[in-house]
Amino acid sequence: MSSLLRLTLVFLFLFVSCNSPKYLERMNEETDYYIVPKPKKLIPANGAFLLNQPVTFNFPDELRQEAEFLRKYLYEDFGETPDEKSDGSLVLLQVNEKMGAESYILESTPESLSIEGGSPQAVFYALQSLRQIILKQNGDRLIPAGRIEDQPRFTYRGMHLDVGRHFFNTEEVKQYLDILALHKINTFHWHLTEDQGWRIEIKKYPELTKTGGFRNGTIVGHFPGTSNDNERYGGFYTQEDVKEIVTYAAKRHIRIIPEIEMPGHSQAAIAAYPFLSCFPEEKTTVPEGMMSSSSKEQQENGRIKIVQESWGVYSDVYCAGKEETFEFLENVLDEVMELFPSEYIHIGGDECPKDNWKRCPECQKRMTQLNLENEHELQSYFIQRMEKYINSKGKKIIGWDEILEGGLAPNATVMSWRGEAGGIEAAEQSHEVIMSPTGYCYFDYYQAENSEKEPLAIGGYLPVEKVYSYHPQPEELTQSQQQNILGPQANLWTEYIDNFDKLQYMLLPRLAAISEVGWTNRDDRKWLDFQKRLSALRKVYDRQNYRYATHVFEQPEAH
């Protein structure tokens, strides 16, 4: 067989059936084509493909995984898969490398269903759209006839999860990844270290998880709390857990960007290795005296540093004057970079008070040696030094927009969270930017204006409609500068999210809104249209038993 003919056969994806005549002339309705995020082009047609016939799966090895996902989704969403017979309706998977890597075409007729994608990833995205348009009617499963031509607007479509404040186990992280995949999110930003917990095993430094992975108590209620629950809390991911999760994500075409926070938000690491602090002999404090009884006892018996038990921002950060600090972080990052294939490593850089650096002899000596004018420049030195090391390993850094202070590291990507100003400044300097402003992208905010009826949240009000209204390319930028915006990311910080049910509630359906912001062209996005199409995702949420904010559907806001 010629290679051209073989490629032609490989690039077919047909799902041929012996439809019963009652579906051939079916008059399809607008609701049959509801998909989130909205496809680039959709052409409806009459009729439907009947998904109740025996089938024969035939596909190249490169799409074996996607064929298995098709079977999996049909079983998970409907409790059954088509009978497979050698003489059944044919299922062939199609890849066309001339198309964009994330582009696909899905076409359904009463006789066949075909999907053509520019890569296995694109075929996978077509399956997510397919899940939303499969209908159940009189016991039959139907795919309405029509043609979808689709591709995303932005190459970066991210979702974050903080596991430092509250820990979510391996199976929960996998389910989180499944939810991201449904929404065509291609990047998972995994926030692994915090003042309140260090969550990743580093074999060279076992105390990071043995000591830093657990706290002796947690404040009750809003910061600074009404009391301390005095309950030991924590957990961490072994390196085998991490490998398992990275593999799981890759099968769903999601890259994981790990975040190892520095130089601030580092009290858990300092509790494990006090030499990392400017002042190892100074006790850790908990605001308003809300320290657990166990930690008080430990400090009385000589264990000065503890894992933080309250939320907020703290001055006990990595010492920028000690060479031991950089040796530690380089060793940590060596193990992290070995675990994550992502080209990016997120190093935080946010909310680092300079109080300790101002009174630390080692930090002041460093500033004098380097002729630095202030502590902001010392942080810039810190970030640039870590960037140089990470670049030497073939990786690039991402940092929160505070890394602009004192001078931006040469090759850094900026994640703009304190509004858009940092992102605009970085884009003007020709740096890559990920837009993640609090006013549109922080899913730890309340979803309803009347917060009394909502689960406890950090504060603020971020309804789905506002998330949906976001435009990640600021008009202040020139058209050329706007190309430096890689895409949007939403963040889920977990100070007040202590279980997976609540996590899902805070995530959904706001994730659907940010997914469409990242996928669909701005001119094609209309709020009322999105509200209607969201009903298709709701059906998948219900079939998967996801928890979500139902009031978004029950009380639509008509504007």
Image (cartoon, rainbow, N blue to C red):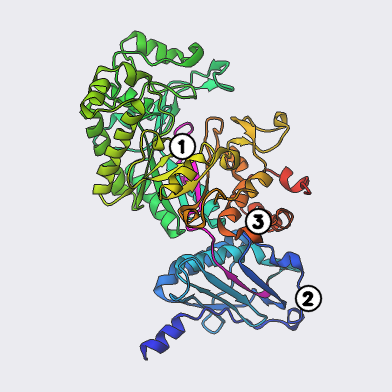
| Circle 3 SS class | helix
Q: Is residue 163 above or below residue 339?
A: above
- In front here: 26 or 419? 419
> Is the Cβ of the residue at disc 2 closer than 8 Å to that at disc 1?
no
Label 3 and label 1: CA atoms lie apart by 26 Å
Name, please, the residue furthest toward the top: 300
Residue 241 image offset from top left, x and y in percent: 37, 45
- In front here: 448 or 359? 359
Residue with the mark numbered 1: 163
Label 3 is placed on what type of residue? Leu
Residue 150 in the magenta stretch? The answer is yes
- In the image, which disc is placed on residue 537? 3
Label 2 is placed on what type of residue? Met
Magenta residue span: 144-173
- In the image, which disc is placed on residue 453? none
Q: Quadrant location of residue 389? A: top left
For the N terminus, which image quadrant?
bottom left
From this viewpoint, is residue 203 visible?
A: no
Residue 263 image offset from top left, x and y in percent: 35, 31
Mark 3 vs mark 2: which is more N-terminal?
Answer: 2
Q: Is residue 192 above or below residue 355?
A: below
Residue 46 in the magenta stretch? The answer is no
Residue 32 image offset from top left, x and y in percent: 72, 67
| Circle 2 SS class | loop
Q: Is residue 167 above or below residue 302?
A: below
> Is the Cβ of the residue at disc 3 closer than 8 Å to that at disc 2?
no
| Side (left or right) of 177 relative to 213 | right
